[in-house]
Image (tube, coloured by chain):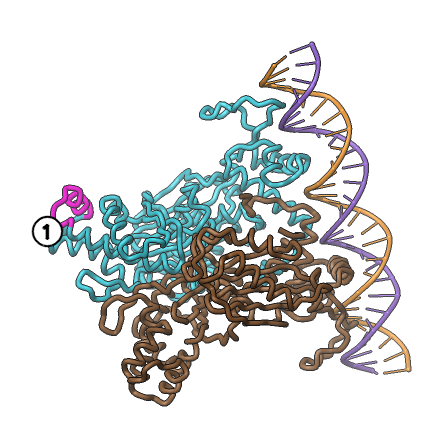
Chain colours: A cyan, B brown, C purple, D orange
Amino acid sequence: MSDPALTAISPSRLRQSNEAAVLRALHRFGRLSRAELARKLRLNRSSSGHIIAALLASGLVRETAEERPGRPAPPRAGRPGIMFELVPDAVFFLGVEIGVEHIATAEIDLEARLVAHQVEPFAGAAVAPEAAIGQALGLAFRAVGAERLGRCEGVGVSLPAQLDPGGFVRVAPLLRWREVDTPALVRRALPVPLPVVVENDANSFAIGATYGRRQARAGVTLFLVLETGVGGGIVIDGVLFRGAHGLAGEIGHMAVPGPDGTMRNLEELIGLESVLAAFAARSGVAAPRLEDFLADVRDREPGAVAVAEDWARGLAHALVQTARVIDPDHVVLGGSLAPLYPLVAARVSAHVRAMQEPSFPLPAVSTHDAPGIGAAFGAACMLHQRYLSLERQPAV
Amino acid sequence: MSDPALTAISPSRLRQSNEAAVLRALHRFGRLSRAELARKLRLNRSSSGHIIAALLASGLVRETAEERPGRPAPPRAGRPGIMFELVPDAVFFLGVEIGVEHIATAEIDLEARLVAHQVEPFAGAAVAPEAAIGQALGLAFRAVGAERLGRCEGVGVSLPAQLDPGGFVRVAPLLRWREVDTPALVRRALPVPLPVVVENDANSFAIGATYGRRQARAGVTLFLVLETGVGGGIVIDGVLFRGAHGLAGEIGHMAVPGPDGTMRNLEELIGLESVLAAFAARSGVAAPRLEDFLADVRDREPGAVAVAEDWARGLAHALVQTARVIDPDHVVLGGSLAPLYPLVAARVSAHVRAMQEPSFPLPAVSTHDAPGIGAAFGAACMLHQRYLSLERQPAV
DNA sequence: CTGAATTGTTGCCTGTTGCAACAAATCAGC
DNA sequence: GCTGATTTGTTGCAACAGGCAACAATTCAG
């Protein structure tokens, strides 16, 4: 309700905001001295000293004893600074992914590094929202001892659903949910009050992939999750762009001309099921597995190569159409079909170049090998990001 | 260079930021008392009193004498508040558009209302950058008396060019510019040092159209400029989204299936020249004017209607593809072809609905009647927005 | 060993907001 | 018309943040 741009800052919020800025800087640069912090944040050395003292007292930051082995500190005149770093296990964040076939959980520390994860089979469409959330949170908190509970600073939930900005589920066809006040259910299922974020699975994946790669934090990055469906998320300068209805980047149903020239849905063209079906038709294998297809492409079997070529053209078309709209500088491919990309990268590039005028700047395409818990990891990252943003509020 | 998210706040910046928040609130709500301001900005009444006192002293704000006639203030217990409002002519902002065929200027006041504008013919492609900028700024400042010069708080320049984030022109084919350090040229041509912003014409138009309509400030809005070319800009929560290379929303070269099913460039399909050419072919008129075409569509002449139907399908396709990527809640059409939209709105909607699954949320489409100075107005608005943002810096 | 450079600390200062109390101004009800 | 309730604006004081300048501590270069 209250527009953040229309909120004034009070001195206490100012301190909170500056402490968060120090935490962000430490997260980004690893270890810094008071003087370096003062320079980076445009503070006085005395002020950064005060802030460091407060963060030391709260246990979020500590002095680093040993020098980093990799960089032996170039000799410089002057008194050497005392380096500080985040205390990784001072706090932690949980993420859970409620999928159609499995539940995944992830725990990350203050440095946003994965410290624990679990995957468990799950009959998504057969479980009611309340039970599903209870099961997922139960799995996540089971691994957390009672003595560590107080150090949890937030829980993120990822769902294959269309969500409004507050996390309310409008409709989740794959789970057969409809009009579910997920945040309320999550809060009720929590052992202690905690900040909660509920987000779409593709968007969660996008944030998680951003957190995993430093260079993607600046600029505009499009993340695509290539499974049977094709999901997507957009991250702008490290912040998730949801769109008006949380559907930004969801290009799975984008219309793309198929090999025969007729318009098709993108995921009918480059989705996992369609690709395997096309491979089956061309190779004669009855129910091929993805690995078989990838192996055949690697071995340049003509049938597989033809299917891969169609895939490359479809992907290229989607990339070009998307680039025209959001002008990204990075595209990151994830999901189980992502390993196909390196095998046909040259073909994709050729198609892209053929469709664009030469002066048009092209995004760099890369793949992200998610270990199957990408969405849960990303959901946890959303709370890490929030914790390091101005609002380190007590609870929601 | 310095990441804004990594900059701490000092008490003096805090005050500046809170003063700007008061100005933004007054711009948005028109007139407010100290107590109302304190509630909206979550400040103490005493603090808002101090801030108002400072703004009164600087002449940016004044007491409003008479009650607003429209709303006769509902009777309420308690001492009535003293209302304040912006002083419109305390400062002003200039915008200039350097086009291919004309130069336009706009002057807006502190309330972002247009107070003066000019248009002058101009041989864009035949004038060197330095001379073009000199001519445009000369026209803009000629209307400003020497005694008002000190109240100018910024100049925006709009160009049909691809620009990097700093306003440096990479290439402007229509003007035949290449690698031009426009901000430097503008600063050199200014009579006094002033904040300067240089922006693409479609992006300028987008910001200007946002400023003109209140409800568009929140959410995601796509603006399309329909001329011979089709330009575009995206505004997210009132802030221009440029993309990685300033090309976000530039969907003119998006591939769209034409009436015969083959893929075509969007602007070859729905651009002004193509539409008039198709109309000429169908109607037999040699060199039809746009008004003739619109009149024929209105009169339901079969040839014109057929052309309009193709246009509607092309536009619908572009809208659907774009909606899949950025998920906007508003689409605003501008440019000389915009008046065609209301005549075929039902057809566009029908095509859009046919291409989307029913659950997909559709953006509301509307038209914006730019008086020919949309880009210049928008360029000025960018400086207004900047003035009301935290950074009210002395000059650049 | 000396000088230059850099860091961290320490008082003191300025400036901003928050708080509480109070006077002023209005409405509702008797 | 008067009283009480309510809201507003003002005022003095307190709390607290960061800036500044000076100083001691520590290191390197010559």
Q: Identify residue type, mark 1.
A: Ser
**Count of picture labels:** 1
Q: Tell me residue B67's x, y (percent).
A: 74, 78
| Residue at 33% over, 44% down | A368
* Residue neighbourhood size for the residue with mark 1, other residues' Cα within 10 Å, grouped as few (<14), some (14–19), many (≥20): some
**In the picture, residue A129 is in which quadrant?**
bottom left
Quadrant into which the N terminus of chain A falls: bottom right
A292 left or right of A381 in image:
left
A250 sits left or right of B257 in the view: right
Q: Which residue corresponds to mark 1?
A: A283
Q: Position of residue A361 (x, y in %)?
A: 37, 52
Q: Going 54% across and 27% down the picture, which residue do you hit? A: A64
Q: Nearer the viewer, residue B64 or C18?
A: B64
Q: Is residue A39 above or below residue B312?
A: above
Q: Is residue B386 above or below residue B230?
A: above
- Which span is picked out in magenta? A290-305
| Residue B346 x, y percent position in the rendering | 37, 81
What chain does badge 1 belong to?
A
Helix, strand or loop under label 1: helix
Viewer can see residue A1: no
